[in-house]
Image: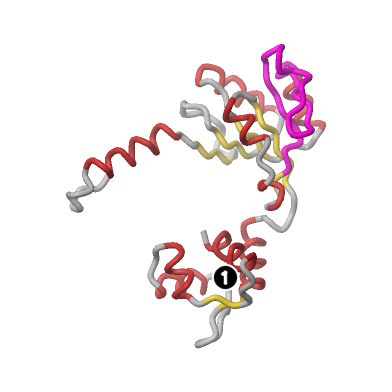
Amino acid sequence: MYYRALANSEKDGYSTVSSQDLAKKERLTPAQVRKDLSFFGSFGTRGLGYPVKELKEKIGSILGLNRSWNVALIGVGNLGSALGSYKEFQKQGFFIKLLFDNDPQKIGAALAGTTILDTKNLASQLRQQKIDLAILTLPGNAAQAVADEVVKAGVKAILNFAPVTLKVPEDIFLRNENMAIELEYLSFCLKNRNNPGKHA
C-alpha cells in the first residue's frame, strides 16, 4: 500500500510527502503511518515529511521490486487474456514470459506479442525459461493438476485465481484470489451498513 502511494506521489511530481497525506490516501492514522515506516529505517524530517523517491526505493527493495521476475500465465480465457495484456506489471518488474492454454484454437495465437503454448509442454518450458512465478486463471477442476506440474517444474510462487483451494508443499508461496468471496464480503457489508457492530 505504501509503495503504491509513494509511486503515485512520485508520478505526481512530489519530492516529499507527509505522514498525514499518506494516512489520508490509505485511510490510516498519521501515527500508524509513522510507526509502520519506522520499521524501514530512519526516514523523514519533522515538518518536511518523507523523501518520496528514497522511501519508495527502500520499500521496493524490501518487496523485491528492484529486480525483474519471470512470470508464466496459465489459462488464457477472459481473465487470463486481460492479465496477459496488462502492461503495468512490467513497470513493477513482472514480465509475463510464457502463456499457456489447452484450447487448440488458442494455441499458436499471440497475445500482447507472446505466443500461447500448449499446456502439454508446461513443465519443460517453465524450467527452460526459469519461471519464478505462475499465475493460474483456470477452471477449478483443472487447477490442482496444473499446480502440481508447476511445483514439479521448480516454480516457488503461485497466484491462483481458480475458485478452489490448492494443496501445495510448505515451501511454495501461494496466494488465492477468489473474487466471489470478495463480492460476498461486499454484499455482507452493504446488507449490514446500518449496523456498524457487525463484522465479517
Quarter of the image where the C terminus is located: top left
Helix, strand, or loop for circle 1?
loop
Residue that sits furthest to the bottom in the current view: 47
Q: Is disc 1 surrounded by few (<14), some (14 to 19) or many (20+) residues within 10 Å?
A: few
Q: Quadrant of residue 146?
A: top right
Q: Position of residue 155 (x, y in %)?
A: 68, 35
Amino acid bearing label 1: Phe
Residue that sits furthest to the front in the current view: 12
Q: Residue at x 30, y 38 (%)?
A: 187
Q: Nearer the viewer, residue 32 or 168?
A: 32
Q: Nearer the viewer, residue 172 or 187?
A: 187
Q: Residue at x 71, y 58 (%)?
A: 66
The stretch of residues the image draws in magenta is: 95-120
Residue 28 sits above or below residue 200 on the image: below
Residue 199 sits above or below residue 17 on the image: above
Q: Residue at x 50, y 77 (%)?
A: 18
Q: Quadrant of residue 100?
A: top right
Mark 1 sits on what residue?
Answer: 40
Q: Position of residue 159 (x, y in %)?
A: 57, 37
Q: Quadrant of residue 174?
A: top right
Q: Residue at x 76, y 36 (%)?
A: 97
In this rendering, the count of numbered labels is: 1
